[in-house]
Image: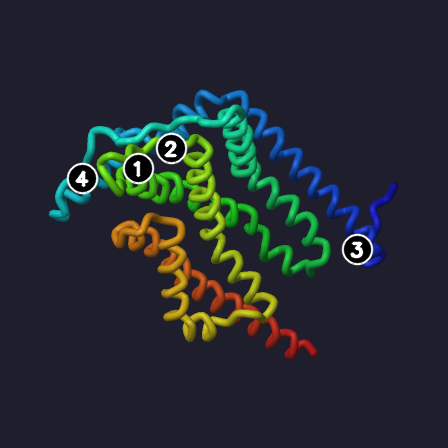
Amino acid sequence: MAKKNINEMSFLDHLEELRWHLIRSTAAIMITATVAFIAKEFIFDVLLLGPSNSDFYTYKILCKVSQYLGMGDGFCFDTLPFEIQSRTMAGQFSAHIWMSITVGFIVAFPYILFQFWKFISPGMHINERKHSRGFIIVASFLFFVGVLFGYYVICPLSINFLGTYQVSQQVHNDFDLNSYTGLIRASVLASGLIFELPILIYFLTKIGLVTPEFLRKYRKYALVIVLVLSAIITPPDIASQIIVAIPILILYQVSIYISKVVLKKQKIKEEKAKKHA
């Protein structure tokens, strides 16, 4: 059966098309999640529990940096004073399932974007599709950079602070497995999505909701929001918040530049259209 032209498709046809894109995306997540479920030794022993070990790469770097800056040995330690335990009957199985799905979503993210693109691209003009060919590559790159930033920066900072924090010497830290995995998932996914800010600004500029002037005007408010956001996704110490806030502020500046370029191209396009009219 021939595929209908987008102009001939009804609302229900669009819903049916969306349903199949969602089914394909879900199938991709489930396939990669199944692979992650099978490779549980690597997922848990190497990736998930990596930031809980004192020999994790980030801790070594932070130790050297703190010593170089004369901040002492605040980030240098031999062991992290806590244990990870499972206190519920289905705790380990639940953590296994959810971490597999999370890994599946991260690995399948480019394909999910591809399905999203396949759904919206028929409604775009030929020139718009041509100039947006790199959307999947750029968006996937930013997402993976964000995931790595969350894993190698936010997670170690959070685990180091929360794992060593004590209200009393008589209280020992024994963290539940689901609490620990929840921290890892939230940090990694939140960071990955935050790094999509330039892509979001690109589309908001295209539809006329955001301009470079608007972004510059409210830059000081954006700074406050970034600091609040950094405080939410990191432990409440100034050094960690600054480390997390810096790349987000850089992304904001990049977004201003992207918005400027988009508007410039739109103006050139409008001028050419007037000349040919």
The residue nearer to you, when weighing 265 against 106, is: 106
Residue at disc 3, secondary structure: helix
Foreground disc of the pair 3, 1: 1
Alpha-carbon span between mark 3 and mark 2:
53 Å
Alpha-carbon span between mark 4 and mark 3:
58 Å
Residue neighbourhood size for the residue with mark 1, other residues' Cα within 10 Å, grouped as few (<14), some (14–19), many (≥20): some
Q: Provide the residue designation for mark 4.
A: 64
Q: Provide the residue designation for mark 2.
A: 175
Disc 4 residue type?
A: Lys
Disc 3 residue type?
A: Ile
Alpha-carbon span between mark 3 and mark 1:
55 Å
The answer to whether 87 is drawn above or below residue 25 in the figure is above
Residue at disc 4, secondary structure: helix
Alpha-carbon span between mark 1 and mark 4:
20 Å
Disc on the earlier residue, 4 or 3: 3
* Label 1 with label 2: CB-CB less than 8 Å: yes
The residue nearer to you, when weighing 78 against 198, is: 78
Disc 1 residue type?
A: Gly
Disc on the earlier residue, 1 or 4: 4
